[in-house]
Amino acid sequence: MNEFQLVLPNEKLKTYRYVTLFVIIINVLVSGFLFYHTTVPRTSTLSLLALVLGSFALLTMIVRFYKNIFKTFRVEILFIILALIWVILGEYLLGACVLLFAILGFYTNKKFIVVFSEAHISYPAFPPKIYAWNDVTQVILKDHVLTIDLKNNKLIQVVIAPESASTVDEGKFNLFCQKQMTKL
């Protein structure tokens, strides 16, 4: 086998979902306030659109929490639309904040995969880290805990996700890593 891929659990996902819910509620409240307190037709129409989109996202997120459905719904796309609406309304700071939150959402919702190839180790940090095998002292996978010991005295130790734990043979993985370190 030329490479191994280990999925790491995304521990920040639950927190991100609660913050997302909070951001949606703020958008719904602000757009509702704007809709009911404006007399400008264009502002009223755009704030109504933001209110409807935000309410739809809020209902979808609540149903997703309790029923575990709508997994393919990406609230980040809705945040981009809301950011455009806020920019059109002249609320540049609010639009920029919502757009920034959407971009962070795309990063937060991705799978974190450590790739062990014959050339190097690719670790999913921000920005992604590439470790050459000659920078590594030891790599061990034991009892679903991945340990990467680097020559610069840095130690990376993480529990791998259950989906990876069931598919990766620890013995073959450790043997592969030992071969890569002894090639040098």
Image (spheres, rainbow, N blue to C red):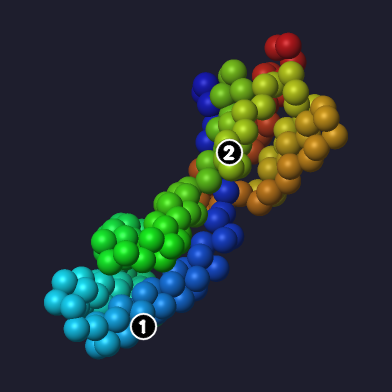
Marked residue nearer the N-terminal end (2 or 1):
1
Tag 1: amino acid: Leu
In front: label 2 or label 1 = 1
The location of residue 155, given as percent across then percent down, is 79, 40
Mark 2 vs mark 1, CA separation in Å: 35 Å
Q: Is residue 15 above or below residue 170?
A: below
Numbered tag placed on residue 29 in the rendering: 1
Dot 1: few (<14), some (14–19), or many (≥20) neighbours within 10 Å? some
Between 109 and 133, the residue placed more toward the observer is 109
Q: Residue at x 58, y 31 (%)?
A: 122
Between 7 and 35, the residue placed more toward the observer is 35
Q: Is residue 174 above or below residue 69?
A: above
The outermost residue toward the bottom is: 36
Query: On the rendered structure, is 62 left or right of 180?
Result: left
Q: Is residue 173 above or below residue 179?
A: below
The location of residue 103, given as percent across then percent down, is 43, 52
The location of residue 13, given as percent across then percent down, is 51, 62
Dot 2: few (<14), some (14–19), or many (≥20) neighbours within 10 Å? few
Residue 95 placement: quadrant = bottom left
- The residue indicated by pointer 2 is 127
Question: In this orientation, does residue 97 appear?
Answer: yes
